Amino acid sequence: MSDSPARHLNLAGASNFRDLGGYLTRDGRTVRWRQMFRSNHLGHLTDDDAAVLRSLGVRRAFDFRGTTERAEAVCGLADITVHSLPVEPTVVAALRAIAASGTALSTDHAVEVMRDSYRSYVQQNTPRFRALFAHLLEDRAPLVIHCTAGKDRTGFACALILHTLGVPDEVIAEDYLLTNQFYRRDPTASSDLPDHVKQVLGSVQPAFLSAAFEAIDADYGSLEAYFRDGIGLGEKERAALAARYLQS
């Protein structure tokens, strides 16, 4: 029986709250437990949830939500400093535009709009992800990375982190897809989109994440070049991240 900490923490006011620790790297080291967490937004945490975060020592939150999203569900934990790295949402607006043209929305439309969104993380929002890594190099306190659902902007950010630390591709994909097991859509959130489209938007697919990495290859030539030229991680910085977040 494993004595490793639980990867998923079952919070009442947040779903998809997961530890990035415990993954083996290609060189045989392990990502440290209880240092980096990923989640959906922290605006509905209960008192018991807040106590769990305090027990974990979480002191920083990195919030990829856009301006309106953040205002609608503010993190109210006084002992957590929130760093806003806004990546404005585009998916719903894009789908509404397609519907407004008179086209019946299909799941294919939803998948392609999601893929476009992931491409935009690279093509338009790399400075936000660069800022996250700058914080990771500066701060030693346990932290949580999140957006609204904790699956797309957060999923890409966490995939980058795990890649940087040397976690194999297939393990990164498995971590990304855990969202489909743990994320609970907010039942109070309303949308005029068809149910079959909302099902696509409320999940993750390998094709979504692959679109971001395809954009990296197209714009930078390779993932290594993206880390160096887009994210600002040279050998020194990557060694510092490994020293901080990996253990033998």
Image: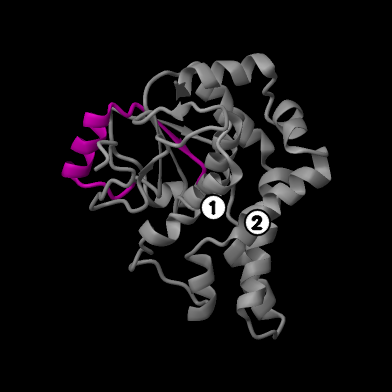
Q: Is the residue 56 above or below the residue 88 in the image?
A: above
Residue 215 relative to residue 193: left or right: right
User: Which amino acid type corresponds to the residue marked 2 in the rendered image?
Assistant: Ser
| Quadrant placement of the C terminus | top left
Q: Quadrant of residue 114?
A: bottom right
User: The residue tagged with tag 1: helix, strand or loop?
Assistant: loop
Q: Is residue 62 in sight in this rendering? A: yes
Q: Are marks 1 and 2 in contact (CB under 8 Å)?
A: yes
Q: Callout 2: 10 Å neighbours few (<14), some, many (20+)? A: many
- Name the residue located 45 percent from the left edge and 29 percent from the top edge: 30
Place of residue 25 in the rendered image (x, y in percent of width and height, measured from the top left): 53, 32
Residue 111, picture quadrant? bottom right
Q: Is residue 126 magenta?
A: no
Question: 142 above or below 109?
Answer: above
Residue 243 position within the rendered picture, expressed as x and y whole percent measured from the top left: 50, 16
Point 70% across, 30% down: residue: 227
Q: Nearer the viewer, residue 82 or 31?
A: 31
Q: Which residue is mark 1?
A: 152
Q: Of all residues shown, which one is farthest toward the front?
A: 1
Residue at the far left: name it. Answer: 48
Residue 86 seen in the figure: no
Q: Which residue is depicted at the point 47% across and 65% down? A: 202
Residue denoted by label 2: 117
The magenta segment is: 43-65
